[in-house]
Amino acid sequence: MKIQIKVHARSKRESVVPQPDGSYKVDVKAPPVEGKANEAVCKVIAEYFKKPKSAVRVAMGSTNSRKVVEIDD
């Protein structure tokens, strides 16, 4: 499954919020430096969808705030 997300790095909390257009807003505490925010995104998305962290990866947009995340079943 692929989902579109909008990431807000350096947030005060970590959360996943579904948006009306079918995408998700993801807040992470990690800064967007050296892939730390992407790792945090994978962790938060995995917890939200109750999947192992290894089943989640950033498919597109690794250096952008808008990303496509792939979740393996």
Image (cartoon, grey):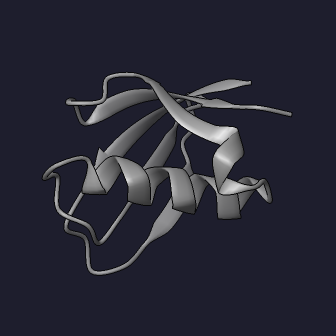
The residue most toward the left is 33
Which image quadrant for residue 17?
Answer: bottom right
Residue at horizontal 41 percent and vertical 60 percent from the top: 40
Relative to 2, is 13 on the left or the right?
Answer: left
17 or 36: nearer the viewer: 36
**Does 20 sit above or below residue 47?**
above
The residue most toward the bottom is 12
Relative to 73, is 63 on the left or the right?
Answer: left
Residue at horizontal 25 percent and vertical 36 percent from the top: 65
27 or 59: nearer the viewer: 59
Percent of width and height locating residue 57: 54, 35
29 or 15: nearer the viewer: 29
Relative to 58, is 62 on the left or the right?
Answer: left
User: In which quadrant will I find the C terminus?
Assistant: top right
User: In which quadrant will I find the N terminus?
Assistant: top right
71 or 8: nearer the viewer: 71
Relative to 18, is 65 on the left or the right?
Answer: left
Q: How many marks?
A: 0
**Does 49 sit above or below residue 59?**
below
Percent of width and height locating residue 7: 33, 46
Percent of width and height locating residue 10: 19, 67
Residue at horizontal 37 percent and vertical 61 percent from the top: 27
The residue most toward the right is 73
Residue at horizontal 62 percent and vertical 41 percent from the top: 56
Percent of width and height locating residue 34: 16, 49
